[in-house]
Image (cartoon, helix red, strand yellow):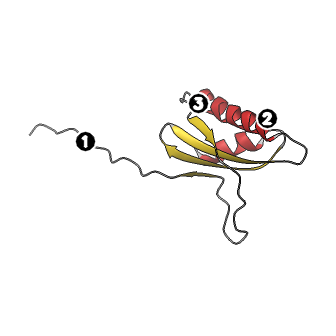
């Protein structure tokens, strides 16, 4: 699933100002949100998690287990990456081929 697809789905959540999603493992992700003024953090977090699950299901993928992280603004000098991965890909092993 491309990061742009995830970003668009989550940014469409009403009451969301900004977010960061980190994929921790192939099945786990952590979501930090910055709700817009006047919006409940719990409500916006639940809606954001639901939006992620829905976009995964629409594409035939199992949604990740999502935990919440506290929001912390990033430096204005560094390009914001709303969606990123913190684990390394597993190398693909090819079966032995008969000689």
- At 68% from the left edge and 50% from the top edge, which residue is drawn? 70
Q: Earlier in the sequence, mark 1 or mark 2?
A: 2
- Mark 3 to mark 1 CA distance (whole Å): 27 Å
- At 58% from the left edge and 45% from the top edge, which residue is drawn? 2
Q: Nearer the viewer, mark 3 or mark 2?
A: 2
Please give the residue where the numbered disc 2 appears in the rendered image.
43
- At 17% from the left edge and 39% from the top edge, which residue is drawn? 96
Q: Earlier in the sequence, mark 3 or mark 2?
A: 2
Measured as percent of width and height from the top left, residue 14 is found at 83, 39
- Mark 1 to mark 2 CA distance (whole Å): 45 Å
Please give the residue where the numbered disc 1 appears in the rendered image.
94
Measured as percent of width and height from the top left, residue 58 is found at 62, 28
Disc 1 packing (10 Å; few <14; some 14–19; many ≥20)? few
For the N terminus, the quadrant is top right
Disc 3 packing (10 Å; few <14; some 14–19; many ≥20)? few
Q: In front here: 16 or 40? A: 40
Q: 47 left or right of 52? A: right
Q: In front here: 97 or 72? A: 72
Disc number placed over residue 23 in the picture, else none: none
Asked whether residue 47 is in view, the answer is yes
């Amino acid at each position: 699933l491309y990061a742009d697809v995830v970003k668009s789905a989550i940014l469409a959540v009403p009451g969301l100002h900004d977010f960061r999603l980190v994929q921790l493992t192939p099945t786990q992700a952590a979501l930090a949100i910055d709700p817009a003024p006047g919006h409940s953090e719990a409500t916006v977090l639940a809606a954001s998690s639901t939006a992620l699950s829905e976009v995964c299901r629409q594409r035939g993928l199992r949604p990740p287990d999502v935990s919440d992280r506290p929001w912390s603004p990033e430096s204005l000098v560094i390009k914001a990456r709303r969606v990123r991965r913190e684990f390394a890909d597993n190398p693909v092993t090819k079966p032995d081929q008969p000689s």
